[in-house]
């Protein structure tokens, strides 16, 4: 009954959710569903939810409410809710939104097609929330939107107990894949034309803790350097507590590991970090940055920062600004603290007034943007290799530009010069940076265009009018 039925997956939250959505779309297509054409109503709408932000619940239920008249107008339409919010709320979702057909958790995304069919046959909502991981997600079919770039999960779950974070309760304790399974997947991806992979984990550099190898992550980075055809390796997100010198050495000495590091700071105040239960302090964090830059002077370092954590004083906030000035981040994801029920921080005293949080937040953004702009301006006149990304080009003063990423992951808008060659998504352009803005670079002087296998694959897929790339990964041995 799924043959020919259309689907749409709506993704919220972190990279892990994006990766999970690739599995969900792969599972649905493997079961006979097809992606709904743009602008058309899907027969199945799947919400892959996040529970990190305070308004996550309101956003979900608001979106679900909007679908009530749509569902009434489309008999047979189904709605499924998965992800972290589903794991947290479980049966509460169908109580508050009884028109939902399926609720599934973070540990059993592979059950979605069966649950949809069961809900259709039994004409009642199906709620299935596994309490532990059933199948490692990377063994499931995958549909990637990119022919040149892919996520590769090295672990799921997290062993940390940060007081503001609900993720460990929803994703469970860390479970590590065996190195051979990870490398097998990487080789399969490269064989399909992938040039760039991002190693993914809730706490990616703690990889190996489950099987007792403290240097497993650095060894994995070095092993990626031996994969022929793999041009770019990235990873996210590491924890400062587990960031060791062997990882820095592996980054610097492995040619295809990119000069880029995203390492969450959260706060620059030692006392706030202690209340957050983050097991490092300002000195250790800045020490890691110093050692990374000593080994890789051109590394771009980005971060996450929370403003207004319970009890945060003006002096503690000033500590964060001082770290920002010293670290000189290429960019930062900044967040205003929001309560999450079930976390220790939600019940802490001295919650910071909203107006105070807002004022500090605006000061932080101004500081981050100013530094990012200065750091970008240092790159004017540099020649960079830019991996061209998906998406339509845009015209500016009659110049057509495509977007892509530099080795350090900075966003670059590249001018198209037909005399040199027109790049496709997945091709690599060598160009000179001619202008720097706070959040991107512009490269109007093109030196060369290198056509790649990834570009060939993307072009073939586009000609076949098939959105995305369907990859059926075989089950990997444990």
Image (cartoon, rainbow, N blue to C red):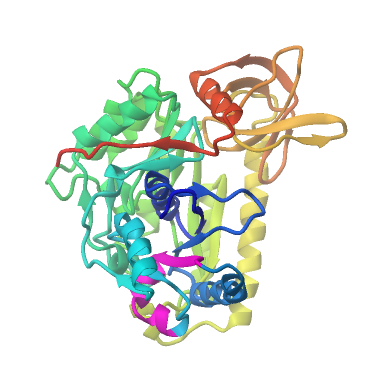
Outermost right residue: 397
> Residue 405: image x %, image y %?
57, 34
Outermost top residue: 419
Who's the residue at 87% across and 34% down the image?
397
Who's the residue at 81% across and 35% down the image?
395
Relative vertical location of residue 42 with respect to residue 406 in this rendering, above or below: below
Residue 428 appears in view: yes
In the image, residue 25 lies in the stretch drawn in magenta? no
Left or right of 179? Residue 344 is: right
For the image, the number of numbered tags is 0
* Residue range (magenta): 76-95
Q: Quadrant of the C terminus?
A: top left
In the image, residue 86 lies in the stretch drawn in magenta? yes
Relative vertical location of residue 148 with respect to residue 202 in this rendering, above or below: above
Q: Nearer the viewer, residue 409 or 192?
A: 192
Left or right of 298? Residue 378 is: right
């Amino acid at each position: 009954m799924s043959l020919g039925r259309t689907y749409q997956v709506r993704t919220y939250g972190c990279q892990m959710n994006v990766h999970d959505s690739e599995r969900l779309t792969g599972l649905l297509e493997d079961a006979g569903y097809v992606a709904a054409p743009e602008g058309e109503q899907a027969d199945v709408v799947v919400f892959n939810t996040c529970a990190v932000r305070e308004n996550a619940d309101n956003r979900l239920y608001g979106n679900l409410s909007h679908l009530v008249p749509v569902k009434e107008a489309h008999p047979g339409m189904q709605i499924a809710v998965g992800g972290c919010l589903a794991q947290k709320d479980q049966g509460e979702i169908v109580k508050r939104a009884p028109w939902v057909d399926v609720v599934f958790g973070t540990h059993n995304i592979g059950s979605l097609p069966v649950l949809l069919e069961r809900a259709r046959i039994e004409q009642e909502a199906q709620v299935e929330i596994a309490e532990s991981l059933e199948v490692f997600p990377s063994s499931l079919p995958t549909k990637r939107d990119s022919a040149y770039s892919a996520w590769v999960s090295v672990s799921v779950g997290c062993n940390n107990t940060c007081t503001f974070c609900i993720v460990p309760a929803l994703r469970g304790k860390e479970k590590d894949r065996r190195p051979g399974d990870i490398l097998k997947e990487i080789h399969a991806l490269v064989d399909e034309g992938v040039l760039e992979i991002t190693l993914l984990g809730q706490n990616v550099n703690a990889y190996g803790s489950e099987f007792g190898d403290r240097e497993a992550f650095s060894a994995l980075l070095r092993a990626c350097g031996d994969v022929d055809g793999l041009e770019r390796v990235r990873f996210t997100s590491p924890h400062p507590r587990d960031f060791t010198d062997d990882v820095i050495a592996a980054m610097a000495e492995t040619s295809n590991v990119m000069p880029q590091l995203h390492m969450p700071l959260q706060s620059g105040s030692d006392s706030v970090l202690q209340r957050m239960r983050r097991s490092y302090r300002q000195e250790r964090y800045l020490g890691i940055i110093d050692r990374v830059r000593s080994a890789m002077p051109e590394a771009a370092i980005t971060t996450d920062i929370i403003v207004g954590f319970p009890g945060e004083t003006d002096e503690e906030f000033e500590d964060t600004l001082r770290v920002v000035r010293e670290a000189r981040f290429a960019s930062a994801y900044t967040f205003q603290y929001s309560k999450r029920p079930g976390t220790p921080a939600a019940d802490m005293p001295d919650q910071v007034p909203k107006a105070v949080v807002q004022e500090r937040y605006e000061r932080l953004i101004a500081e981050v943007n100013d530094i990012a702009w200065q750091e970008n301006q240092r790159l004017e006149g540099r020649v960079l290799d830019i991996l061209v990304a998906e998406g339509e080009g845009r015209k500016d003063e009659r110049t057509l530009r495509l977007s892509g990423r530099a080795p350090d992951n900075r966003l670059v808008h590249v001018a198209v010069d037909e005399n040199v060659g027109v790049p496709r998504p997945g091709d690599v352009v060598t160009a000179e940076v001619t202008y720097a803005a706070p959040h991107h670079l512009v490269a109007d002087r093109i030196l060369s265009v290198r056509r790649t296998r990834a570009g060939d694959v993307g072009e073939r897929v586009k000609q076949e009018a098939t959105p995305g790339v369907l990859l059926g990964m075989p089950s990997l041995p444990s």
